[in-house]
Amino acid sequence: MDQSGRVATVKEIREFEGEIVFDLIMYDRDGEKIGRTSPALGGPTTFEPMCSIEGWDRVVQPTFPMEPQWVVQSDGTRVAMLWSARLPPANWKKPKPRTRGLPASLVRNIENERLRNALEKIASGDNDPRTTAREALGWTISGPRT
């Protein structure tokens, strides 16, 4: 789908003079193929040949017939246009989940025994930061130990 609400599927991807170009099959708002919309000049009439990917986004397959929806633009204005939810770019990869806990080498090098125990407790999934902090500082419920 492009920024003006036109819907197309990719027929073919190729390289032409060092640029990646797409052949697109265009559809109307009812889901019917509309063929080529630019002047044919003796070329194919069933698809748009050699289109730049500039301005086109991957979208969830739309349900037809498409109805105009209010879409908020980047400048905050709202425009009525044909719309379908966007997908991430084709080369997008889901980020790796962050690992929890501290590396064993870091925990081994900590000299303060109470701090090391607190960090190991946190690394094992303890979610009570106040109690863990009190234990690491050597505090009791009423205040610091003497």
Image (cartoon, rainbow, N blue to C red):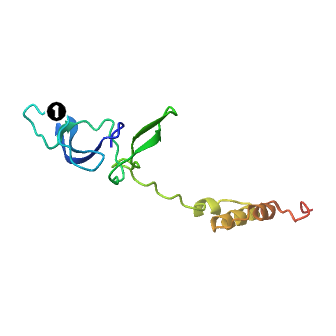
**Residue at the spot 43% in from the left edge and 38% down from the top edge:** 80
Using residue 68 as the reference point, say whether residue 21 is left or right of it: left
**Residue at the spot 60% in from the left edge and 60% down from the top edge:** 102
Where does residue 63 sit, x and y in percent of width and height?
34, 54
Quarter-of-image position of residue 23: top left
Relative to 112, does residue 28 appear above or below in the rendering? above
**Residue at the spot 19% in from the left edge and 33% down from the top edge:** 38
Element assignment for label 1: loop
Where does residue 94 sit, x and y in percent of width and height?
43, 55
Look at the image and tell me in which quarter the C terminus lies.
Answer: bottom right
Where does residue 134 sit, x and y in percent of width and height?
81, 62
**Residue at the spot 66% in from the left edge and 66% down from the top edge:** 120
Residue under pointer 1: 17
Using residue 103 as the reference point, say whether residue 117 is left or right of it: right
Pick the front one: 52 or 123: 52
Pick the front one: 145 or 87: 87
Look at the image and tell me in which quarter the N terminus lies.
Answer: top left
Where does residue 20 sit, x and y in percent of width and height?
22, 38
Estimate how packed mark 1 is, as few (under 14), some (14 to 19) or many (20 or more) residues with alpha carbons within 10 Å. few
Pick the front one: 63 or 87: 63
Relative to 92, does residue 75 appear above or below in the rendering? above
Using residue 45 as the reference point, say whether residue 81 is left or right of it: right
Pick the front one: 44 or 57: 44
Three-letter amino acid code at the position of disc 1: Glu
Figure disc tally:
1
Quarter-of-image position of residue 133: bottom right
